[in-house]
Image (spheres, grey):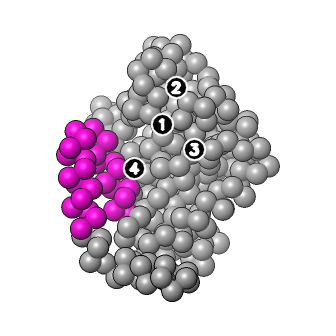
Amino acid sequence: MTDSNRDPRLTGLDGFRVEIDAGRARGDIVLCRPPMNVITMPQRDQLRRAFEALDEDPAVRIIVLRAEGEHFSSGGYIRGFLEASPEVVSNLAWNIAAPARASKPVIAANRGYTFGVGFEISLACDFRIVSETCQYALPEQRLGQIPGSGGSARLQKIIGITRTKDIVLRSRRIPARQAEAWGIATECVPDDRLEATVDALVDELRGFAPLAQRTAKRLLNETEDALLSTAIELEGHCYGRLRQSDDFREGVEAFHEKRKPQFRGS
């Protein structure tokens, strides 16, 4: 079901649409500028607002970022970089980091070309499910530029400096299976299984307690650069707060009663 009436941020969208399935607590952001799903400069800010709207929507538990056609996105509208003001360019990384800032889990479904900003926004998601046709690349060196929306920084955190240099400095394309082996992709599946795999992951994630899920995502994001001792201390504080939650009590009781827990998000 397409629903653009919930929030003014979900109207007049450029190159993508938003679909909300309240019955499955799922919100999809769908790139729809075939055949390459090029992402324009104005679209980046709209994407940020769409993620924020879905994150605030109580009917949505899980957010999915996907695309129409055989390619996720070949990247940004190149001439737009020359036309954009310095102020707009300075916000590129902030806009594309919207999936990471969302409190809810975000799944990217990638197939075909996933280049430039298409790769960067996927890297900001929590899960990257890829079809065997997927190719990742940061090709900015071919234009006399570098990635500008967090791509090289996020990639280095995931795979280390040696492999990141190999990808960035050579504008190298990484096929799906290699991306999975390197830890860039969460899972690689046959192309005709991409949607079903994403559906299954959405259903799995919906089964967990919302408060604990949001807490885990935020804790992992905020302790990525922390000392081990600091991360452990913060984990303990979060654990202590969740121990007082209704959902934790329900989880414990359901475990002992050998039944499925009914989490309420409190």
User: Mark 1 or mark 4, which is nearer the start of the sequence?
Assistant: 4
Q: Label 2 to label 4, Cα distance in Å?
A: 19 Å
Element type at mark 2: loop
* Mark 3 or 2: the one toward you: 3
For label 1, the residue is 120
Magenta region, residue range = 214-240
Is residue 101 toward the left or the right of residue 118 in the image?
A: left
Query: What percent of the width, then of the height, locates residue 65?
Result: 56, 53
* Amino acid residing under circle 2: Leu
For label 4, the residue is 100
Residue 149 lies in the magenta-colored region? no
Name the image quarter holding the N terminus: bottom right
Asked whether 157 or 80 is in front, the reply is 157
- Residue at 71% across / 50% down in the picture? 194
* Amino acid residing under circle 3: Thr
* Amino acid residing under circle 4: Ala
Residue 219 lies in the magenta-colored region? yes
For label 2, the residue is 138
User: Mark 1 or mark 2, which is nearer the start of the sequence?
Assistant: 1
Q: Quadrant of residue 136?
A: top right
Query: What percent of the width, then of the height, locates residue 263?
Result: 45, 80
